[in-house]
Image (tube, rainbow, N blue to C red):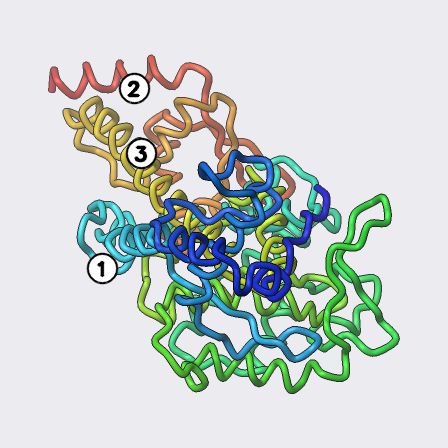
Amino acid sequence: MKTPQRPPTFPALVQEHAGTQRLSHILELSRAPSADYRHWDKLRHLPAPAGFTSEEWWLALKVQRSGASKPLPLLDKKGRPFTFCVPDLVLAELHEIDVGAGSAIGIPEPITNPQTRDRYLIRSLIEEAITSSQLEGAVTTREVAKEMIRTGRPPRDTSEQMILNNYVTMQRIAELKKEPLSPEMVLGIHRLVTEKTLDDPTAAGRFRRPDEHRVVGDDFGEIFHEPPPASELPARFQAMCDFANGKTSSCFVHPVVRAIALHFWLAYDHPFVDGNGRTARALFYWAMLHAGYWLFEFISISNILRKAPVEYGRSFLYTETDDNDLTYFLVAQTKVIRRAIVELHEYIARKTTEVRELEAHLRALNLFNHRQAELIRHALKHPGQEYGITSHQKSHNVVYQTARTDLLDLQTRGLLETKKRGRKMVFVAPPDLAPRLRKMEKEARKA
């Protein structure tokens, strides 16, 4: 990724065309609707409307955007405000988000069903924990990370510790969703995110000091962002919390726009030695849940961001290189959010189909509860998979005794085998599980 080319300045373009006949034509062009929100770095390579230069086209767009922009209390290092507008493409995304995540309309039954919702919640927490950490450089396989969280074993390295920290943090965010945001809360979230992962353990849960200068750049020495001085962080933090709590907006700010702006704000201020990205995304989740978008307990935006990290980074740079126009980040993030909602619905649809097929296969037996049925479904796809009582307990959010009873019952019925690992009993999916199930089904039908 490279820094995008900065656009021609608005005042210079206006001065160049002031008092000319061309300016009236440019103003007329500014009234034409625009279906997208391009940065100059992209627009300069596209053919301009007939009769106009690229610079004139850009001036028309800037006139159009400036008329709809609103200021935020977020200021850059020179005291200039960030602004945003809500073009039609963002409005359309906000509508889809409101419909898909702001109410119970259209939400699949597995999430509203108390007996099954916990399974999807745990899955989402694990998914966000893994992918948010991978965005920040964590290196491990998904299966290993899932095994660590489900079994409760201690992390083996920094990457696993990052993932475990994110998992714990996301659980904490759900607990804090009704609380107003405060600097102390954010520092506590950062402490959870970075525990046992920093070279200096004392940096967890505190602002970076003046001697801890940090910049955002690449491995080749190019600097993309230099955050505000450490001395300004306490005041900027309080301003951020006031904005998050709705105290400083002079105009209506859609809750999703507020959550996205909060995400950007913390990333821009870069208040910590490390863990800024993970903390920023955690604050986004807090803001969405705080605003009543309860479905976000089940959604992972980092899973989408990880698939296109360059676009994620570029949306920050577009904002900083074009007069602090946060709309670029809004456009990018509303697309990410909507895609995350779609993927959740698609995932639930797939799992619902699988469960129905499994239930159809086992209905005649009428011997398994929904937790056992889910384990059997997984075991059919993973011969030799090992299951522990603790991991089964965490996967379904039940007490230890219930998890133990589930597994012992399956072992008694010959659907799981057992072996010892130290003092613990481990349950193993046999390679011939499918034939055993078919045999059990036949016997049940005969009976």
Per the rendering, the mark at residue 54 is: none
The Cα atoms of the two marked residues, 1 and 3, are separated by 22 Å
**Label for residue 351?**
3
Element marked by disc 2: helix
Separation (CA) of disc 1 from disc 2: 40 Å
The x, y position of residue 188, in whole percent, is 60, 75
Q: Position of residue 179 (x, y in %)?
A: 42, 80
Tell me whether the residue at label 2 lies in contact with that at label 3, contact meaning CB atoms closer than 8 angstroms: no
Q: Residue under circle 2?
A: 437
Which quadrant is the N terminus positioned in?
Answer: top right
**Tag nearer the camera, 1 or 2:** 1
Disc 3 packing (10 Å; few <14; some 14–19; many ≥20)? some
Instruction: Provide residue 172's location: percent of width, then percent of height.
Output: 49, 68
Name the residue at 27% across, 57% down: 98
Left or right of 149, for residue 103: left
Q: Residue at x 50, y 58 (%)?
A: 62
Q: Quadrant of residue 169?
A: bottom right
Front disc: 1 or 3: 1
Q: Residues within 10 Å of mark 2 (few under 14, many from 20)?
A: some
Mark 1 or mark 2, earlier in chain = 1
Give the residue number, with chain letter if any, for mark 1.
Answer: 103
> Circle 3 — which element?
helix
